[in-house]
């Protein structure tokens, strides 16, 4: 059998990076078991208590410096490099593990922990160190507005037009390591399915949207993703 998929779209979530040592959100010991969303992941939280929000992301940024991609990130980079058609990876993750594995055609729809966003002028800059409330923006000079470049609840995820255009044309959609709780990402399977794509979930356990997928493979990302990519590339 030949691999005749021409356009693949891959959606990834926190489960993909779990075996690299990064916490997921909704698992038993996940981030939302220790923090309340409304305290750290909304624009209102940042307006109310910027120190608390910056601390939350400063801790996660320091954890992102030395973190390494795992076998699942590497398999997806190999798929992009070796698949004869197009492969677009859309990640909800703010960590840099896809790019560290070598993925090039990548959209960080929920932003990037290693970037700062100036709420005053919209400048996006690389950031290695902690953000503080008195830090001034290198572009506009204003202080008080330097926030992590991440998409909080109630904010519009990035590059949605590009993502929906790709979903509307894809013939294979893979959803990997995401619980399917957060929209608009949770709705991508329906978009891809409506476009006629074959839809596959690869996750530790059935997600919220399991009934919408044509196929599901459950197991650890470092096991099921390389095996699936091998199968796809050998077809
Ligand atoms: C493994 C594994 C292993 C573990 N191997 N697998 C009512 C209905 C519908 C929508 C809404 C609604 N009310 C509000 C909304 C919209 C809202 C939303 O979806 N809310 C829901 C909670 C209901 N969405 C938004 O606000 C979004 N914006 C938006 O809709 O814009 C339009 C708009 C704008 C303005 C006004 C009106 C409309 C923005 C969402 C932003 C999400 N932000 C976060 C934080 C970002 C930064 C950060 O990282 O801190 O993004 S929340 C958090 O959840 C993070 C993640 O990207 C996101 C998704 O989580 P993910 O990746 O799925 O992780 P988990 O933990 O949930 O799942 C991990 C999975 O992996 C599990 O299934 C495990 O089993 C599995 N796993 N180990 C394989 N080893």
Image: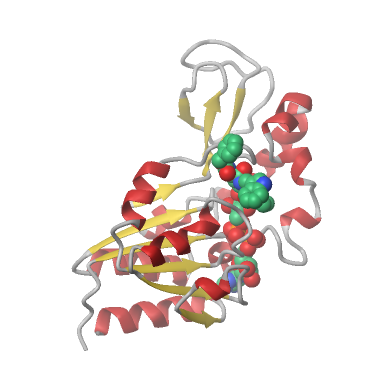
Q: Quadrant of residue 178?
A: bottom right
Q: Position of residue 162 (x, y in %)?
A: 34, 45
The image quadrant that residue 233 belongs to is bottom left
- Image: 35 above or below 4: above
**In the shown orientation, is residue 223 left or right of residue 135?**
left
The answer to which of 42 and 15 lies nearer the viewer is: 42
Q: Quadrant of residue 196?
A: bottom left
Image quadrant holding the C terminus, namely: bottom left
Is 148 on the left or on the right of 68, as rendered? right
Q: Is residue 223 visible?
A: yes
Residue at the image position 62 percent from the left and 20 percent from the top: 145
Provide residue 19's location: percent of width, then percent of height.
58, 69
Choose between 182 and 89: the one closer to the eye. 182
Q: Is residue 23 visible?
A: no
- The quadrant of the rendering that contains the N terminus is bottom left
User: Relative to 28, is 114 above or below?
Assistant: above
């Amino acid at each position: 059998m030949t691999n005749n998929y021409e356009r693949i779209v891959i959606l990834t979530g926190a489960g993909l990076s779990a075996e690299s040592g990064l916490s997921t959100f909704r698992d038993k010991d996940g981030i939302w078991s220790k923090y309340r969303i409304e305290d750290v992941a909304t624009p209102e939280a940042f307006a109310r208590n910027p120190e608390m929000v910056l601390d939350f992301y400063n801790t996660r940024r320091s954890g992102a410096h030395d973190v390494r991609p795992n076998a699942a990130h590497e398999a997806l980079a190999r798929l992009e490099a070796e698949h004869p058609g197009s492969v677009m990876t859309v990640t909800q993750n703010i960590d840099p593990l896809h790019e560290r594995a070598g993925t090039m055609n990548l959209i960080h729809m929920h932003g990037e922990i290693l970037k700062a966003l100036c709420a005053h002028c919209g400048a996006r800059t690389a950031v290695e160190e902690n953000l503080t409330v008195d830090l001034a923006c290198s572009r506009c000079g204003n202080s008080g507005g330097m926030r992590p470049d991440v998409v909080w609840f109630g904010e519009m995820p990035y590059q949605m037009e590009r993502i929906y255009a790709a979903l509307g044309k894809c013939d294979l959609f893979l959803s990997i390591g995401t619980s399917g709780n957060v929209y608009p990402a949770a709705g991508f399977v329906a978009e891809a399915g409506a476009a006629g794509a074959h839809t596959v979930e690869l996750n530790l356990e059935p997600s919220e949207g399991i009934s919408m997928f044509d196929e599901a493979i459950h197991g650890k990302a470092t096991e099921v993703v390389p095996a699936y990519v091998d199968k796809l590339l050998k077809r």
